[in-house]
Amino acid sequence: MLNLTTTLDAIARAVAERRKGYVCVTGVHGVSEAQDDPEFRRILNRAFLNTPDGMPMVWLGRLSGHRAMGRVYGPDLMTLVMRESVARGWRHFFYGGANGTAERLRAVLTEKFPGLQVTGTYEPPFRPLNDVEQAVLTAQVAAAKPDMIWVGLSTPKQERFMAANLAQLDTTLMLGVGAAFDMLAGTKSQAPRWMQRSGLEWFYRLCQEPRRLGPRYLKNNPLFALRVLGQLSGLRRYELEQ
């Protein structure tokens, strides 16, 4: 059952076995998007790991009998893996962020964890990569030889990117952690732990970015609650694949 400890164990095994895959850190937004987008649903279902990012995911898992399920929050997962990487020699590459966030994140984490190997960063434009940019990224990753590429974009953009690029990039794992880049780099603040544990982190982030996140939360949160009620009552059953 997924929690931070079991997720770290699975990542360690995948790197040791050189088993390629991508990790989706998924909350209410991702689950809701997947209900309306069959292609995105397939991307999530084909992930190496789909971890519960957000307390509603954890509560539903525990309600279904998975008592050991725990939240796998992007910043916590990234911090845990970076700490473990020093002893294991894992190498990392950061893809995403804006205005130098990826480089700032590298500086913050390598200072916090002496010996950490972040062998490259790439800050993409706010559009799909063109052929030249794709070739530059591929060559840069090949030279950096990372065990993991961390992707700090929004959902579903980061999941689509990982699914489309995993095969051609010379790495074992890709992990989509969204706003973890900004939070760990210090460009955005994290909600207090009590808000995270009580499922109110969305409200904290909404207050920070109402224009960008308002449409997402005001649409997806009520829809998610209605869908959960429908499934729990037996009035509606949601398929994993279509």
Image (tube, rainbow, N blue to C red):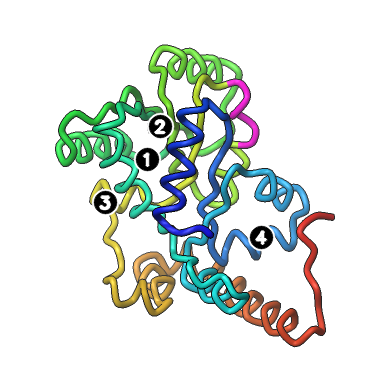
Report crowding for label 1: few under 14, some 14 to 19, many 20 or more residues within 10 A (C-alpha): some
Dividing the picture into quadrants, the one containing residue 229 is: bottom right
Residue indicated by mark 1? 98
Q: Is residue 219 above or below residue 114?
A: below
Residue indicated by mark 4? 33
The image position of residue 47, as x and y in percent, is 62, 44
Please state the extent of the stretch shown in magenta in the rendering: 163-168
Report crowding for label 3: few under 14, some 14 to 19, many 20 or more residues within 10 A (C-alpha): few
Q: CA distance from mark 4 to mark 3?
A: 27 Å
Sequence-earlier tag: 2 or 4? 4
Secondary structure under the numbered disc 4 in the rendered image: helix
Sequence-earlier tag: 2 or 3? 2
Secondary structure under the numbered disc 3 in the rendered image: loop
Secondary structure under the numbered disc 1 in the rendered image: loop
Q: Is residue 140 above or below residue 112?
A: above
Sequence-earlier tag: 4 or 3? 4
Q: Which mark is residue 156?
A: none
Residue indicated by mark 2? 123
Q: CA distance from mark 2 to mark 3?
A: 15 Å
Residue indicated by mark 3? 187
Q: CA distance from mark 3 to mark 1?
A: 10 Å
Three-letter amino acid code of the residue under disc 2: Glu
Query: Foreground mark, 4 or 3?
Result: 4
Residue found at x 43% / y 16%: 140
